Image (cartoon, rainbow, N blue to C red):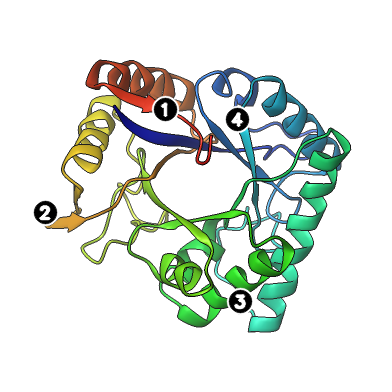
Amino acid sequence: MLRIDLNCDMGESFGAYEMGNDEAVLAHVSSANIACGFHAGDPRTMHHTVRMALARGVAIGAHPGLPDLQGFGRRPMALSRDEAYDTVLYQIGALAGFAQAQGARLTYVKAHGALYNTAARDAGLSQAIVAAVRDYDPGMAFYGLAGSELIRAAQEAGLRTVSEVFADRTYQADGSLTPRSRPGAMIEDVEVSVAQVRRMIFEGLVRSVDGREVPVSADTLCIHGDQPGALAFVQRLRREMADWGVEVKAIGA
């Protein structure tokens, strides 16, 4: 039986502002990428999200982003290598504290938003992010865009790499994600999403917005928890994958 991890960005509420339908979505995913308070989230939200994930047997990972609450971490920011290292290490440690307090530990790290997308093309930034993960806990897995500098840096550092593909995002010809500032960046039609996921899993290919076939490696599949249709998408994807004979299971489980 084929196996794939199904991850979702979570814990992105902040104060009185609620985002996503985390409790419902957690019933259908195998891994939760939990915001660490820089691009979204706050201490109470982090604590609550870790608790909900653990109660459902869902693996927990740190989802560090740029220090930009107003922009939700999606606006590019120029960080030196040292700044990137410190930013990521700080956030991993913060979330790990909530996990440890509840008798658990983080199993992976996945960068968020502009930090993720910039590092996917920037070897130096990727190396800084990876160094923070390695120095905190070399036993953690590292999630990165399939075929990107993130994966290359993690492999060079000896970390366990997990190549990621996206169920609800479109791709460019170079394998990068279509920027959210452009029309069509998000896939809002569940039928289109299902078709894209099937090809990525079984053929190792995704069609870019200009019609080119881009090779990908699908170890983990991401669905964004902040999109309005997240619950419907993840429910449908779970049904389809069960029909395809694909087992959804966390990395290392």
**Label 1 to label 4, Cα distance in Å?**
21 Å
**Label 2 to label 1, Cα distance in Å?**
29 Å
Mark 4 vs mark 3: which is more N-terminal?
A: 4
For the residue pair 49 and 73, the one nearer the viewer reads as 49
Decide: marks 2, 1 in contact (CB < 8 A)? no
Left or right relative to 154: residue 82: right
Q: Residue furthest right?
A: 101
Asked which quadrant contains residue 135, the reply is: bottom right
Mark 3 vs mark 1: which is more N-terminal?
A: 3
Judging by the rendered image, the residue that carries numbered circle 1 is 248
Viewer-side label of 3, 2: 3
Numbered mark located on residue 20 in the image:
4
At 43% across and 68% down in the image, what residue appears?
120
**Label 4 to label 3, Cα distance in Å?**
30 Å
Numbered mark located on residue 115 in the image:
none
Left or right relative to 88: residue 247: left
Disc 2 residue crowd, few under 14, some 14–19, many 20+, Cα 10 Å: few
